[in-house]
Image: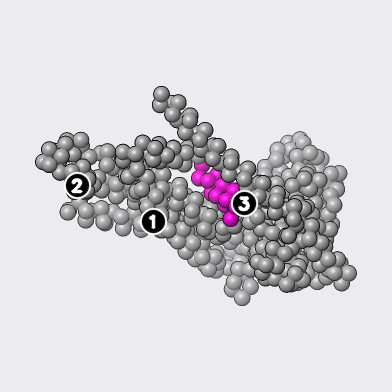
Amino acid sequence: MKNKKGLLMLFYILTMFLSLGLNASSAHAEEVASDSSLEEIKEKGVLVIGTSADFPPYEFHATIDGKDTIVGMDIEIAKKIAEDIGVELEIKDMQFDSLIPALETNNIDMILAGMSATKERQVSVDFSDPYYFATQNIVIRAEDEELYASKKDFSGKVIGAQMGSLQETLAKSEMTDSELITLGQTTELLLSLKTGKLDAVVMEGPNALAFTGNDESLITFEGGFEGGETDGTAIAMRKDADTLVTAVNESLAEIKEQDLIPGYLAETGKHLETAPAEGETEAEKGSILDYWSYFLEGTGNTIFISVVSVLFGSLIGGLLALIRIGDNKFLRFFATAYVEFVRGTPMLIQVMFIYFAVGYLINIPALLAGIIAVSLNSGAYVCEIIRSGLASVPKGQIEAARSLGMSKKTAMRHIIFPQALKNIWPALGSEFVTIIKESSIVSVIGVSELIFQTRVVTSVSYRGIAPLAVSMVIYFILTFSLTKLLNYYEGKMAHD
Ligand code: ARG
């Protein structure tokens, strides 16, 4: 009987989600049919581009006047397009493999990320005219120069490529004797190469040259790949966004006519030189703490997301717990279903679901989506904390209170709840600590919390271990001081 109920519950929830998805895609289709893509951007007054800023010289992070800025050839192109359309430019930085989903779900208007206009991608997006043609390279450690000269020399070796990139496809189809590892960011790939976890990285030519030009320990050569003959690097937009594509092509045509790309690259190159060269000693590279402002922003956001999510999570959890111990069968069923569903699915998917799927219907900023997802998630756990706290008070207590003539409500409020609180409080505290750590998951949708910022520091400082160590220490300080604080209050409560 119980199982049947559970199954029903699951079906109910799945149908709900499915119908949400269907509605969303039909709404999307309508919007596309009467192509108003350009009009909409003009109305909004802002062009939102998505990029993955780990890809010099196309796009990367640089510190300009002490401020973190995304620069690169693609960014210059985006500025020109926004200017031509007559709107502001907003840049959203995310992992390369999240870009197409973000575009499809209206979270961004176009992708400028050194993206090759491959046939596979043309199925789901429309591309502008190409604005650049690149070679495909292999990057290796300089000390291995004698060992490798072509893609054939890597049989039995471990090679890397960026997740969801053309290079991943090339490695898979043309280096079949090698073991392939894919990672989200090109900077992570290079760190893996330098620390010996990879023997080579397949990388786009200009990107490979930008990195190796700044790092004497790495060298690069053309891979001699047969595939990858694409239609060049282009800007991706939603399917059938014809008016927007036309506008973009006009800007690109001007860029071509006036030969602006070399200028963009030169402008960008200036910032590349600020990256520390490998020959430099640690001291010459400067301290990792020079990047304190990145860590500060990340820590601030992590605290903000955690505090807000714990507050809303407790509200949601409290409400759910009340429902679960209450008398209304229908609501009780719903609350149980909610708790089971949330606890039975990974928070990673919940975060992406809220951001991307809900983004279909209404456009919510990543930070808000992150907070909503974490709060909804935490609510389920808080509900269980409260419920088991209440259940931990011996039955005799309520029986005694009732036999003294107290109503159920009064007994709950004055007898049961104060006792339960002593169990609930510490568990709530550890939920808070958990949220501080787990909220790092929202970095996948591009929220600049501590983990996201740690990654950014990795790519601007070209260092792999130090940023991790700093971030680990910050997390520990946060959770440890919180635990101490909670213990203090818990101790006080024990004396009451
Ligand atoms: N051109 C390659 C592709 O389209 C790699 C692009 C990677 N871009 C980036 N911003 N990381 O797959």
Q: Position of residue 494 (x, y in %)?
A: 20, 51
Nearer the observer: mark 1 or 3; the answer is: 3
Queried whether the magenta region covers residue 350, the answer comes back as yes
Residue 43 in sight in this render? yes
Which residues are drawn in magenta?
346-362
Element type at mark 1? helix
Quarter of the image with the C terminus in it: bottom left
CA gap between label 2 and label 3 equals: 46 Å
Nearest the eye: 418 or 494 = 418
Residue bearing the label numbered 3: 360
Q: Residues within 10 Å of mark 2 (few under 14, many from 20)?
A: some
**Which of pointers 2 and 3 lies earlier in the amino acid sequence?**
3
Residue bearing the label numbered 1: 311
Q: Residues within 10 Å of mark 1 (few under 14, many from 20)?
A: some
Nearest the eye: 265 or 468 = 265
Queried whether the magenta region covers residue 104, the answer comes back as no
Residue bearing the label numbered 2: 410
Residue 147 numbered mark, or none: none
